[in-house]
Image (tube, rainbow, N blue to C red):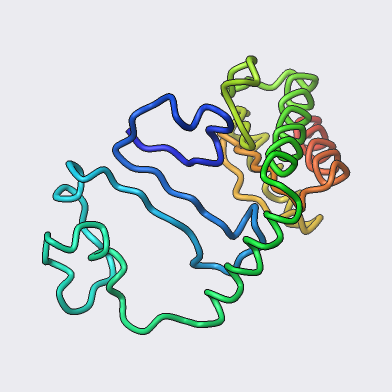
Amino acid sequence: MGCRLQQLGDQRGRAAFDQFDLEFTDWLFAPAGCGLLYIRDEMLGRLWPTIVTGEWDRPEFKAARFMRVGTNNRAILEGLMAGLRFLKDLGPERVYARIHQLARMSFERARALGLDALTPEDDSLYGAITAFRMGAKDAARLAELCKRKRIWAMVGERVRVSTHIHTRPRDIELFFETVREARRG
């Protein structure tokens, strides 16, 4: 069982995980490549790193063998620290409340358009990500409209909306107005 910790909110301690990852670039303003991967000891032998350097295959290093990629980039670490200070200054509870409020807004907009929600209606079961399904023709039109309006999106028949601390309510409104336009044809 894997998960993304940002999706767990206050339920972090209630489940056992094989692995989870924290991706800091979206919700912490940290540079690309910053994050954290937790792997339960029993699962370490089943995972293989995609980029390796010397001694990557030494099981006694446990999860540290997944970090053996050569010289670290100091700028990335400085960016990560700035992102962590930003989170600390705002407070994790405020950040979670904001991204969850925006996710609820996305869920409500999708429902108002009659889209097939893939996210549970009970908002205690999701954090910052909601998803819905739309038809192939509508998805193709949505992809073209997003490109034209410079909305960064990876659109398919299943659409995932990830809200972040920097997401603005008007960004969500623009996206769902674009969905509405795509569905009108």
| Left or right of 146 on screen, residue 46 | left
* In front of the other: 69 or 169: 69
How many numbered marks does the figure carry? 0
Q: Quadrant of residue 75?
A: bottom right
Residue in the image at 31% along x and 81% along y: 70
Residue in the image at 57% along x and 34% along y: 157
* In front of the other: 184 or 176: 176
Q: Is residue 45 positioned above or below 70 on the image? A: above
* In front of the other: 177 or 50: 50
User: Which residue sits furthest top?
Assistant: 122
* In front of the other: 136 or 108: 108
Q: Position of residue 73 (x, y in %)?
A: 47, 81
Q: Quadrant of residue 32?
A: bottom right
| Left or right of 49 on screen, residue 178 | right
Q: Position of residue 185 (x, y in %)?
A: 78, 34
Residue in the image at 41% along x and 80% along y: 72
Q: Position of residue 155 (x, y in %)?
A: 61, 44
Q: Position of residue 117 (x, y in %)?
A: 62, 21
Q: Quadrant of residue 179?
A: top right
Q: Quadrant of the N terminus?
A: top left
| Left or right of 169 on screen, residue 151 | left
| Left or right of 81 on screen, residue 113 | right
